[in-house]
Image (cartoon, rainbow, N blue to C red):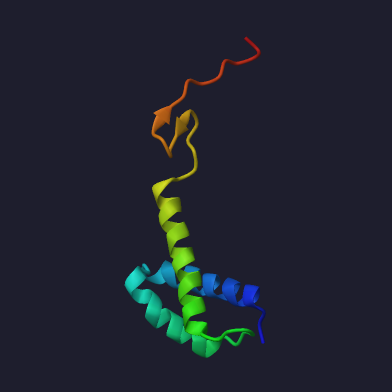
Amino acid sequence: MLTRSEARAAVHAALEARSRLDPIGPQDIPIFAIEMSRILDFPGADDPIADIEAWAGTWLDARVVRRSFPRRARGHDCATGVRHRPEADPRE
């Protein structure tokens, strides 16, 4: 039996592995949740499918945000689109 945090980590790992083969969209989450509920056994799961759907939705939202806002490029704030002047070199 897994703890809830271990089950969540297993769901995220399965989503990561599956997304490498085929992109996962919101329409795929209910089927994925049913499949994972058959595999995972974790305590306190009155409705394991709802828990797995929530975790998968959080994972999917995080991936969308990462794609929309990649790491900040030097001198450019990706979130606001503002270019910042590079800081002066203190050695000069």
Give residue 41's quadrant in the image: bottom right
- Residue 29 location (% of width, % of height): 39, 75
Question: From this viewpoint, which residue is outermost toward the top?
Answer: 92
Question: From this viewpoint, which residue is outermost toward the front?
Answer: 46
- Residue 17 location (% of width, % of height): 49, 71
- Residue 73 location (% of width, % of height): 47, 35
Of 48 and 25, nearer the camera is: 48
Q: Where does the N terminus fall, quadrant-wise? A: bottom right
Of 22 and 4, nearer the camera is: 4
- Residue 71 location (% of width, % of height): 49, 43
Question: From this viewpoint, which residue is outermost toward the left?
Answer: 27
The number of discs equals 0
What residue is shown at x 62% (from left), y 84% (from top)?
Answer: 44
Q: Is residue 34 left or right of residue 88?
A: left
Compared to residue 91, the image places residue 3 above or below, namely: below
What residue is shown at x 51% (from left), y 85% (from top)?
Answer: 47
Give residue 13's quadrant in the image: bottom right
What residue is shown at x 40% (from left), y 56% (from top)?
Answer: 64
What residue is shown at x 53% (from left), y 75% (from top)?
Answer: 11
